[in-house]
Amino acid sequence: MSHSMKHPEKYKPSVHFVKKAVFPSLSQYQSMHRESLRSPDKFWGRIGKGELAWFTQPKKTLDWKSPFAKWFVGGKLNVSFNCIDRHLEGGKRHKAAILFEGEPGDVRVLTYQQLHDEVCRFANALKGEGVKKGDRVMIYLPMVPEAAIAMLACARIGAVHSVVFGGFSSESLKDRIQDCGAKLVITADGGYRRGQVGGLKQNVDAAVAVCPGVRRVIVLKRTGHLEKLNPIDRWWHELVAHQPSTCPPEKMDSEDPLFILYTSGSTGKPKGILHTTAGYLLGAHLTTKWVFDLKETDLFWCTADVGWVTGHSYTVYGALSNGTTTLMYEGVPNQPEPDRFWQIIEKHRVNIFYTAPTAIRSFIRWGDHWVKKHDLSSLRLLGSVGEPINPEAWRWYHQVIGGGRCPIVDTWWQTETGSHLITTLPGVHATKPGSAGLPFFGVDMAVVDDQGKEVKAGVQGKLVVRKPWPSMLRTIHGDSERYAKTYWSDVPNCYFTGDGAKKDADGYFWISGRIDDVLNVSGHRLGTAEVESALVTHPAVAEAAVVGRPDDLKGQAVVAFVTLKAGHKSGSELVAALRERVSKEIGPIAKPDQIRFAEALPKTRSGKIMRRLLKEVAAGGAVKGDVTTLEDLNVIASLQASSGEES
Ligand code: WT7
């Protein structure tokens, strides 16, 4: 990426080992880490037993029939019990569990006791609607406490939730409802974003109209902008009004599904990533505790929407499982002004702040004066996630937000991994701006070549994991063959991440980004194939090829090359129509930044689109904005092919 190269600089190890209860000395940390790799069963067995609350202890730590893993076999537990009930017995009963700030400025605090009562009422309401253990429930809500309440209520009764980010279109929602066979959808009459009321309900109505399997829609009143319900709808507040505030937690098997979360791959429609109960919870719990170095009094703020895995594992499950206070903010960072985040940190005295590099680059662009207006001295730890952080952004984050005193954890992980796999641990490891750090406990990470052989330090290769880990995905919902093929066939006996990386001489990993046909746009994962499919639904489009282009703000921008059917004309009107089409099919986040019309797409003799060439054209193009004239890419293609660069 261009922005990461501007000021190459040697790093200064600036963090020194800090003695703490879990790691009383550096050598004890090291021996624990060694043990976690050498005897993962013994290590995870002990940690799982000590960190989670069980109804029945597991009989066996791991049952591995590659590529299918079962962790904590025979164990019984409940995620909502672990996130709520176990904190009610001690001094945390009246501690804030969720601190919510809406975009208009409304603040709500739910203590653990209140969270318990709300979750139980809603769980009883779900039961009343006929939801049973194993049923799938769709959640399409703004970032409000009820999103967490709905997730925990599902977990309490053993229903499997699938949260869909509110920025996805009704078309995407429909695909996901159908793929996971959901019976019930939870939504709201809207949410506040950018000073406006975002419409979720209309999208649900459109989706549900073609999903006969959905028997009920529960509607949360957030904005008061909905007059009338459809026959299938019920108000959230009416359903919970007379429900008891207790609901016994279902005794779930360690391997019972907890949630399905859809994410983009390099081919076809998004995949339903399936996570189960014990292993996932342990991963989310332990990384939250150790990577964010939680203290009893912390206020933890992860800015991710619960529609993404970061919101699942850190805003909700990891934070609450540890009995910490988690902050949820509904809106965008520049509403009403670009200092909203800093205002929130100052007002509520946030201690730990976890956000994405793309956001950090926006803050830099908006200017330091917005930060300087606020007292950020409550912060003691910063986190970064979602894409490689360029060293300039790292240093700005460290200096301007962290006042030079807060360590930064750059956490590498994926929807599939469930929790952090590469990171530094504060107080234990030195940090290097731009490197995510070192593998977490029990994670056997490596960089390999195309043959699957580990490469030497400093050499670029494929990032793989060589052993199963507790919070790994178990399968792709409804398609175990695709699971095996997508993740476990590229490199023999390894989980292939889709990322390229290199490992330096100190064992630190440097992630270069996706090397498959997946884009990372503002930390959001997007499949080129999905955007292409959306484009060809337009009657004017014959063929489409989508590639990423380095972008200083978003990391990657979406560039689409399009050929038209006979009789159709390129032009700015068609550009607008195509962008709209993608927005309707997938969601506004997928709108191409640039659409380029071509006579033909450059192809190899066997008919494969030469993506590498298109990437170069997209990146090198002096052309700014939409290209509305036809480009003859075949000329470049033939040049490249003759110089042997075809792939
Ligand atoms: C992809 C996963 C789970 C976090 C949210 C995104 C990229 C994630 C980092 C990081 C470099 C990162 C990778 C990965 N990524 N974190 N710290 N440094 N790259 O989850 O949507 O499943 O995307 O995000 O490319 O494969 P996701």
Image (cartoon, rainbow, N blue to C red):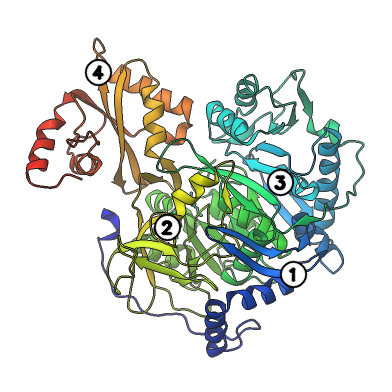
Residue 193 against residue 112 in the figure, above or below: above
Mark closer to the observer (2, 4):
2
Q: For residue 233, which quarter of the picture?
A: top right
Alpha carbon distance from label 3 to label 4: 46 Å
Please tell me which residue is depicted at 85% across the width and 69% down the height of the picture.
Answer: 90
Dot 4 and dot 1 residues touching (CB under 8 Å): no
Alpha carbon distance from label 3 to label 2: 29 Å
Dot 3 and dot 4 residues touching (CB under 8 Å): no
Horizontal and vertical percent position of residue 229: 75, 20
- Tell me if I can see residue 98 in this picture: yes
Q: Residues within 10 Å of mark 1 (few under 14, many from 20)?
A: few
Mark 2 / mark 4, whichever is N-terminal: 2
Query: The residue under label 2 is which amino acid type?
Result: Phe
Judged from the image, the secondary structure of the residue bearing numbered disc 2 is strand
Q: Write down the residue under mark 2.
A: 496
Please tell me which residue is depicted at 56% across the width and 69% down the height of the picture.
Answer: 291
Residue 226 against residue 89 in the figure, above or below: above
Q: Write down the residue under mark 3.
A: 151
Q: Quadrant of the N terminus?
A: bottom left
Q: Residues within 10 Å of mark 2 (few under 14, many from 20)?
A: many
Horizontal and vertical percent position of residue 60: 70, 70
Number of numbered discs overlaid on the protein picture: 4
Q: Write down the residue under mark 4.
A: 570
Query: The residue under label 1 is which amino acid type?
Result: Lys
Q: Residues within 10 Å of mark 3 (few under 14, many from 20)?
A: many
Mark 2 / mark 1, whichever is N-terminal: 1
Q: Residues within 10 Å of mark 4 (few under 14, many from 20)?
A: some
